[in-house]
Amino acid sequence: MEHPLGGESSTSNSTDESKWKYDVFLSFAGEDTRLRFTSQLDEAFKRSGIKTFRDDVDLERGRDIRQNLFQAIEDSLCAVVVISEKYANSKWCLDELQKILESRNTLHRRVFPIFYDVDPADVRKQEKNFGNALAEHEKKFGKATKKVQNWRNVLFEISNLSGWDTRGKNEADVIKNIVGEVWTYLISKLPSYNDNLVGIDSRVVDLMPLLDVGSNEVRFVGIWSMGGAGKTTLARVVFEKLSNMYEMCCFLANVRETLQREDRVSVQKRILSHLKATDTEILDDYEGRKMIRKLLYGKKVLIVLDDVDNHNQLKNLVESPDWYGEGSRIIITTRDSHVLTALRVTRIYEMKMMKTDESLQLFCNKAFHKDQPEENYSKLTESVVEYAGGLPLALEILGSFLCGRSKAEWIDALDRLKRIPDNNINEVLRISYDGLDEEEKTIFLDIACFFKGWKKKEVILLLKGCDIHSKIGIKVLIEKTLLVETGACTLQMHDLLQELGRYIVRQESPNVGERSRLWEFDDIKEVLENNKGSEKIQAIVVPQKNRIVNIHSEAFSKMSNIRLLIFSLKEFSTVKSPRGLKLSSALKVVRWPNFQLNALPLENPLEKLVHIEMPNSQIKQLGNGIQIMRKLKFINLRNSMNLVETPDFSGIPYLEYLCLSRCKSLVRVHQSLGKLKALAMVELELCMNLEILPRKLETNSLTMLNLRGCEKLAVLPEFEEDDFGSLSSLVALDLSWNNFVNLPSGCFSSLFRLRFLSLDSCKSLKSLPRLPPRLFGLHATSCLSMETPLSSDEHIWNLVASLDHECRGRTKYYVISDEDYDDDRPLDETKSAPLRDFFAIIPGRGIPSWFSMDTLEMRWHHCVIEVNIPRDFRDSEWLGIVVCLPVTFFSSMLKIYWSTKAPEDDDFIHKEWGHGTALFSRSDCQCIMVLELNEETCWQHLRGHNNSLHIKFEIYGDRDAELCGCGWRLIRKEEIRQAERCNLNDFNQVTQPQLATPHEVSLPWSVLGYYIRSK
């Protein structure tokens, strides 16, 4: 069989490259490198299946050596020239080099120079040994001869080519890089398996690094994509190109289909036949397994298993890597990535859809037998290519179908495709759908009909309400390439797969009222207005249209199996709900914005209802009928202006989420809400007339409580410390824009899981209670009645002391300002989260007296400090450096960056992160940070006996932002722990302490705390 890297090229414009005998001509000086570098390089080429010519091995005896060498150069696709110290001593090497560069210029051969332990500049300038060698040649041939001048020219020319300089480098690494680059070049020059396989060459090149045919390890490689993308074609092309490199080869096509009609023994016999086994008589699959393993053991084999859709299909066929010899490759093509996961295949090539130019070329090849469309067919061609979405199968089928047809026939065919997809395309795509279980089919059809482009989280929530295991189901659909999750966490699928799903539903019945799903507005309007529904309907999602729907009062009565009802309405859409409207008792999920009735229609008990959303509704009361909705978990009546009070919740014990935000007439929330054990989230934001809350919340599940803007709640009614303590699971608490005067002193301290607390614009609040130990973010802007200024030394230290030393996994943020905080611009936490530190913004301009204010450099936008790091600072007992930066700035997103270096270094190492926040109007504030010193920020800069560290702080804001100073101090964890344990009032007898020097901080925080407090 012909060598895989040889053969006839399909490139029509390069007759010189149409045939070659060798892949690489290897030119070298035998005296220097034959026994070492060149031999190792040649062996590496051979292991990779690259055929080389070496003059010391491949010269034919009895022929003219010069002619033989020059012919070999012309018969090679590229040349690798190893230029060593004595290369120029050999006239044979110089003649070879001259011929190689001549072939480069005339036959467009690629040349790869390797400068083996020589300086390329010496080659270029012909100095040292190269100059001496050429001088010797001139003595022999005479200075006037052209021969030596030509040699000088070619040495100069090759020295200017890109190559490898081996000096100071590991030879094994250099050889690996050389083989890799030569291999990539050779692959790019290989002929296509078929001239009509558009785009295949680039995909072969992309796949080759995963195969890494030069490696001796046994590799399993997967090719994964949706049906019709070209997996089999790619695998076949690679198989044909590489098969001659292996002792045994087998391409087993259509594994899924074959095992459906044949037993495993028959497939084993087929494999043995491919592998040229003479005796294929086997009794059972276990016997076949032993025979296959015996045949393969120790052999270098190439096996392709095409279209595998279940990892069990490969049982007793090809299994463990220890079945095979070194360098074996097993390629598996599949539509299901879980097959590869189950087989522990980690090298996976995901085939992407064709690019637009590739799609156009493939389609035109089939439709017009050329690369471009016929005149007057360009627009129609673009429409077909767009419809195919880069799927090669669709492009080929549609191109062949439309070939030779008139424009009118094209237009008619395209119109038909919008309603009736091509059968040949659907047959291939439907294979993956047919392999799903019933629940996965339900999810696929729901997404195809309704939820393509929706957020994954929202789809999971809605389908979970329908008692569908959507998390694992969506994962399976993604693995089977029926679904894609985008970077924005939305669910997408190929347009042809969406059309397949919708076509499956349309095929259920010619009568729209007898189909399982309705998604087109006109179909829904017909069914709901004319009462044409049936028990077949499972789900209705009304698309966004500026249209009116007049629902028949009995429209849902016949829908005894409907589980999902969603109105995705635009602002001016109207769904007129008649009095006497009856909802189906089968409903599990209802989303109906702008609901016009005053109460839920409960003539039919909604016992199966799990999820109800009616924002902006006219509902005044939910009614006592809610008592029988025992499965209800999710209620959202946001912005329902007429809602006055909530019902008794005791009948819905599994409620997890309640949103009544902006229900401005709401006065009372029923006491029973506090007894719901499963309750996780409560949102009552801007319920401005809310006066009565449950006296006690007896739930251990509540993670988020939002009482923002509930102005009538002057205090939290009977929320004692123990009551808050029962909220042990609370993560986020928003009490902003309320009129609280005081909060119980210990109300937050026992909330060990609380991460985010907002007290913004609590303008009557006189003091902050002690903060919980693991708080990550505090907003307390515009708290204008604080009895103790927030900028006092005491508050600054209390914030620093609130650090939790057992849980320092991410940044802490405190935003405390006397200015108005921009609530719509969140803290920029994404970039700084990886660093474990603390950040607070506090009103005021001064620097607390317990900070050192020594600086090396002070500018309006940056400053530099020098910190003498204690010799025991690596001890984990050191917390870090507390820094105070007074800043003045106008309306801006203030950002602060910091970087470090050793004093003798020129440049600071800049971090790729920064703290930041936004404040309205002019603001004088103190930015307090605790910087943790670790390998990245500190130790890498400290050398020898030098314990000095330079730290630079830079501010970025508007052009008026100004840095007004810098204070800093080193602190120990134990000093903070002492402060937490001590009552500072017990230290009245302590006099004002002497501020310790930065490198001798040992003052207990109990004493320092008294000093701070006394000021």
Image (cartoon, rainbow, N blue to C red):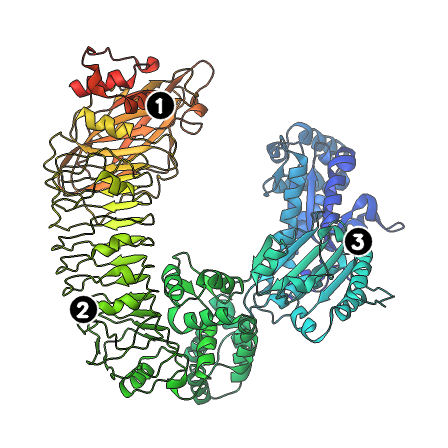
* Residue 597 vertical position relative to residue 714 in the rendered view, above or below: below
Measured in 3D between alpha carbons, the distance from the residue under mark 1 to the one under mark 2, in whole angstroms, is 56 Å
Q: Is residue 370 visible?
A: no
Residue in front for this viewpoint, 421 or 96: 421
Quadrant in the picture for residue 18: bottom right
Q: Is residue 232 visible?
A: yes
Tell which tag, 3 or 1, sits nearer the viewer.
1
Residue in front for this viewpoint, 818 or 298: 818
Three-letter amino acid code at the position of disc 2: Ile
Residue at screen point 47% across, 68% down: 356
Which numbered marker is on residue 299?
3
| Residue 654 drawn at (x, y percent) | 34, 59
The residue under label 1 is: 973
Q: Secondary structure at mark 2?
A: loop
Three-letter amino acid code at the position of disc 1: Lys
Circle 3 residues within 10 Å: few <14, some 14–19, many ≥20: some
Three-letter amino acid code at the position of disc 3: Lys
Q: Which one is earlier in the sequence, the residue at label 1 or at label 2?
A: 2
Quadrant in the picture for residue 77: bottom right
Quadrant in the picture for residue 124: top right
Measured in 3D between alpha carbons, the distance from the residue under mark 3 to the one under mark 2, in whole angstroms, is 76 Å
The residue under label 2 is: 619
